[in-house]
Amino acid sequence: MSWVYKCHTIELIPQDMELVQILLFSFIQSYIIMSSATAANTADAATSSMTNVFAIGRYKTVLQTVETRSCTTKSTLAVPPPKPLLIARPSEAGDYPILVLLHGYLLYNSFYSQLIQHIASHGFIVIAPQLYILAGPDTTDEIKSTAAITNWLSKGLHYLLPPHVQPNINKLGLAGHSRGGKVAFALALEKEATSLKFSALIGLDPVDGMDKGKQTPPPVLTYVPHSFDLDMAVMVIGTGLGEVKKNPLFPPCAPKGVNHQDFFNECQEPACHFVAKDYGHLDLLDDDTEGLRGKTTYCLCKNGKSREPMRRFVGGIVVAFMNAYLLGDNKDLLAIKDGQKTVPVELKTNVCIG
C-alpha cells in the first residue's frame, strides 16, 4: 500500500500499517467520547437554565397589609381598595405581572402569606383580598367583590406601590383556593363583568359545595364535559386526601362530585391538572396559622405529614404556569409535565391538554 502526500509517495510496511490502524482507532474513540461529553454538557446547560420554581426565587419580597375605608374610618389612600388586601411583591425595580389569589371558606388571607411570598419571589405581584369574615353558603357577594377588586387594580394599585415597582395589568392571573376557587371560576365565566381581562385561571383544590346536587349558589359545575367556555389557560390543582374524611364527625373538605376532578373535566384546552397524592385540602397554608380559625385548619381536614412540601409544590407550579401563559416561557411547565423536573410531592395526576 502507498499514500501520496504533497506529490511524494510513501511506502508503508506492515508494522506502519498496524500503527496507523491504532492511531485511527484512538482518534475515532476520542471523537466519540468528546461528542458524548458535548451532548451531556448541552443537556446539563439546558437543565441548569430552568429556574428552580419550587425554591424561593431571586427577588427579595415585601409583604404589606392594606386596609380599606369603613363606616367609622376614612382611608388616607387616594383610591382605596374595595376590600382589605394582603400584597406580596418584589422589592427590586421592575415591571411585574399580577396574580389575584382568593382565600378559602372562612379563612384569613394572612394564612397564605408564605405561599404568596414564594410566588412573588419569582417576579410577580400577588394580591390576596379578605373577601369576608363571616359568610353563608351563597357566593354571589364574593364574586361581586372580586370583580370590584379587579376593576380597582388599574385605578388604585399603583398608589400602593413604590414608583420603581410597576404592576403590569395586561398580564393578569386569577387563582382561588377551595370555595375561593369556585369564585375564581365563576368570575372567569363572566358571572360578573370586569374591565380587565385575565390570561390565566388557577383552581387550588376548588370546591363547589357539599356534593353533586348540593352545590352552593350560584352553581359553577354543569357536569357537561369541556363545557367551560373560558378564553384563557386553566390549571387545576387537587389533593389526594381532600376527599377523605378527617373523622366521622366532619365531611371531607373537597368531596367527590364537586372537587378538582369535576372542575378539570369541564375545562377546555389549554388546561393542566396536577394532584398531590399524600396531601390534604389545607396543606398549602402557612405552617403557623394563628387564632381559633388557624387551629381548626389542622382539625377539620385530612392532612399530610407536613405543609411545607405541598406549599412549595403549589407555589412552584403556579410560577411555572404563570411563566408559561403570562410571560411565554413554558420550559419549567413542560419539564414538570414530562417528569424531567423533580417536584416536592408525589403526583397522582400529571396531565396537560392543548
Image: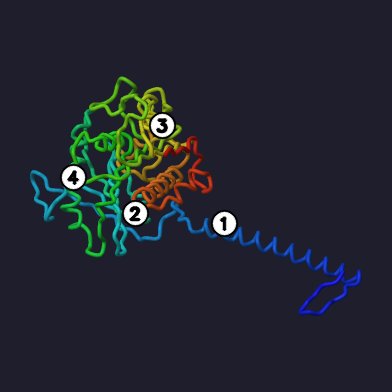
1 or 4: tag closer to the N-terminus:
1
- 78 on left or right of 168: left
Which residue is more in the foreground, 7 or 308? 7
Q: In the figure, is residue 352 to the left or right of 99?
A: right
Give the image location of residue 96, x and y in percent. 30, 57
- Residue for badge 4: 195
> SS of the residue at dot 1?
helix
Q: Amino acid at mark 1?
A: Ala
* For the residues bearing labels 3 and 1, Cβ distance under 8 angstroms: no
**Residue 184, picture quadrant:** top left
Q: Earlier in the sequence, mark 2 or mark 3?
A: 2
Give the position of the N terminus as an image quadrant: bottom right
Q: In front of the other: label 4 or label 2? A: 4
Rendering quarter of residue 269: top left
User: Real-space Cα distance between discs 4 and 2?
Assistant: 24 Å
Q: Residue furthest right?
A: 14
User: Helix, strand or loop at disc 2?
Assistant: helix
Dot 3 alpha-carbon crowd within 10 angstroms: few under 14, some 14 to 19, many 20 or more: many
